[in-house]
Image (cartoon, helix red, strand yellow):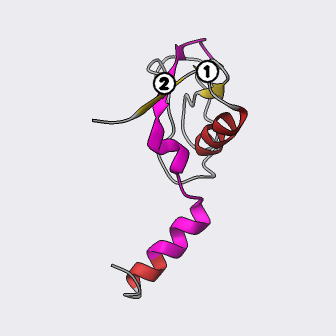
Amino acid sequence: MMNLIDAPWTAEQIETLNRLQRGELYGHPYTCPHRGEVPHHDNGHDTGCLLATKDGWVCPDCGYTQDWAHASSLEAMSLADMMRLLSRRQEGACP
């Protein structure tokens, strides 16, 4: 069973979730279920990325909302940390 966090979200949670959305953290962004419809922009990381707000996710293009996220999203690693971990694993430094 996946653990979810429900809105309202704290300022720290919002910042972490939006970093994930911008591609600064390792993981797949949350996207609008209507992202195949025009207009849904590409933020350079994916098309139809949602924006984290105090009240949950909102699609800046069509107004879709969602009031939950996976708790594990708050533990996402930075891309630099993920690359270091993968490099260490390839060198046999960790299991």
User: Counting residues from the N terminus, which is met first, the one under dot 2 or under dot 1?
Assistant: 1
* Residue 61 falls in image quadrant: top right
Residue nearest the viewer, comparing 82 with 6: 6
Pointer 1 local density, CA inside 10 Å: few below 14, some 14–19, many at least 20: some
Give the residue pinned by disc 2: 68
* Residue 17 falls in image quadrant: top right
Q: Is residue 10 above or below residue 76?
A: above
Q: How far apart are marks 2 and 1 (CA)?
A: 9 Å
Whole-percent x and y of residue 28? Answer: 47, 44
Residue 45 among magenta residues: no
Task: Say which element carries label 2.
Answer: strand
Could you tell me which residue is drawn at 54 percent across and 33 percent down?
A: 47
Mark 2 against mark 1, which lies toward the viewer? 1
Whole-percent x and y of residue 25? Answer: 58, 52
Q: What residue type is labelled 2?
A: Trp
Residue 74 among magenta residues: yes
Q: In this view, does 8 lie above or below 93?
A: above
Could you tell me which residue is drawn at 27 percent across and 35 percent down?
A: 1
